Image: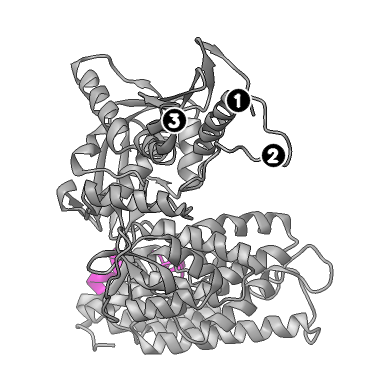
Amino acid sequence: MATGPDPAFEAALAPLLPEDEQWIRARHALLAIGCALGAEHMSARLEEMVVRHFGDTLPAREFAVLRHVRLPALLALANSGYYERMGLEPERRPDPAAALADDPGYALFAYGALDDAARLLDRIHAGKLPYQADGACNHDEASVLGLAALVAATRDEAWYPNLIARLLPGACVAPGAARTAPSQALTIALGHAVEAVPTPEAVLALRQALKVVRHAGLQKKLARHQKPAERGLLRRPEMALRLVDAGLDPKQQRSLLTGFFEGAFASSFALPYAQWRARLLANEVAAAFARSLIWHAGAAFMLGDGDQPVDAQGRALAVDPEAPVALWHPVEASEEEREAWRARITRLQLRQPVRQAYREFYRPADGELFAGYELATVRLIGLARREGWTLDCGCLERQFGNVRACFVLSDDIYPGYEGVVGSRALAFWRGTQRVPQHEVAPRLLSEACRAIDLLVSVSAVALEAQDDASWARSTRVLRLAQETGMDAMRRHAIAQVLRPQIEAGSVRLQGFHVHAGGAQVSMRTGRALRAGAPIELAAPAPGKRLRAVPWLPYDEALLERVLHSVGLLLDAGRGE
């Protein structure tokens, strides 16, 4: 600590400080103030109060360490509000874990604190210490351990996987058959930490904890962290692929890798080509993803015979071992290139695990398309929460790479709100700075618009007003649907899959309907009509495969329904 100013300065500072009884709760902010101003007497008095209040417990030991960290880390901790409300902070707030991660003294403290807690829980579960529900760790200690876990995860410490695998299950389930927990407070703090800074091992520890926890309320609280934590791994692609080596069964691996690659379209995921091959092709499940997706390393490629890179026409390509490999995105390609890859996918009948060749894409001018709608809030909120959006002051927010998309609404809404709300602007932010749409990376903008298109498509009930502006917007929406939106990509897929039947004249596409066998099938609903009347199509006999039911390029229930209906109509026309 710096030696302080004269006593007169500290006397002048005193009226600006909170009452003595508030010093413990505000200790981190006061420590930052004391350090910044060199108010040594105030800081020494604060430490005395902390020791008197906490004794030799974990919060007091942490405070002694914090007295020696750099001022920026103290300011970040004080301004984050971490100790005032457990939970995730908005992206624009300072991240105390990131600031403290650069301090080796605090990192050493974090290891000791988490290791001591894990040893304590191990002894409780081994019967070496008497069990008391919620007796292993109180709220103040849990807050310190939660921050220690955040710092360890941020640093990706080598010792963290082992400790989090012991701590989370150990804290949430009682020894024996009791439906209590050694420490609900620690379980909740660690759950928040896993969501805020996920690592593959921490996500697996969370999954394990959810399998064993018996306390119903605690199970519900922990479950809220699972999906956000798995999505959060996408912000750390350099470590997310460690999941393939985590000992999961193939079904679990496919589920997690599907989520990873879906999110990787809007992340900075890239690996040197040699490392990419070593990481993905060594695992059977991951290799299946690698072989069915399109990649980019200076030029677009897929893996052909012998897992060698080839272009859309199947010609061999040479890729430098150090060239960064990322997922190919259609918004960054020409229409000719997009069509070439769709043709290859169709020719080889590859079913992509995530929608890529037929992925919807959006340009900067398309952002205004999503303003001026009336949205049903129950459907909007439910879908938004499942898709990873958060509500904040009348807008829906979601992180896409290094920018935050804000879908502004006409009113504040909240879970349980029933009614209709208007859609307004789409804005992008990087920290506290607004970013013009044309400065957002094309794939980030496209992915944000694609996500908002889904929200609007599901929850829109009407345009707000039938004026010239709304008619112009309707025209733009129709153009988007016909060219690059969700309807358009489904139409492209159907056209590719049914190309032989279309060329033979047995199938015709008109607008958003497929005409076959004297009937028409809607691409938007899957309903079949003949002469304007709905018809019921019988399911095929068990074990009999429809000759006209084609392969699907990607998994979508509606696409499958449309093509299955068309297949039934065509087979019926052949008398089968």
Q: In terms of sequence position, does the residue under pointer 2 or pointer 3 come before the other?
A: 3
Front residue of this view, candidates 179 and 283: 283
Alpha carbon separation for disc pair 3 and 1: 37 Å
Q: Nearer the viewer, residue 458 or 135?
A: 458
Q: Which callout, 2 or 1, points at the residue further toward the start of the chain?
A: 2
Count every numbered label the image shows and give the total: 3
Residue 79 place in picture, x, y as percent = 33, 65
Q: Is residue 372 left or right of residue 63?
A: left
Image quarter where the C terminus lies is top right
The answer to whether residue 361 is seen in the rendering is yes
Q: Quadrant of residue 374?
A: top left
Give the residue displayed 58% in from the left and 77% down from the top.
164
Q: Secondary structure at mark 3?
A: helix
* Tag shown at residue 459: 3
Of badges 3 and 1, nearer the viewer stands: 1
- Amino acid type assigned to the residue bearing label 1 in the image: Ala
Figure check: 406 above or below 513: below
Q: Which region shows up in magenta? A: 11-26
Q: Which residue is mark 2?
A: 544
Q: Secondary structure at mark 2?
A: loop
User: Pointer 1: what residue?
Assistant: 572
Report the residue at 53% width, 73% height from top: 244
The image shows residue 458 at horizontal and vertical percentages of: 45, 32
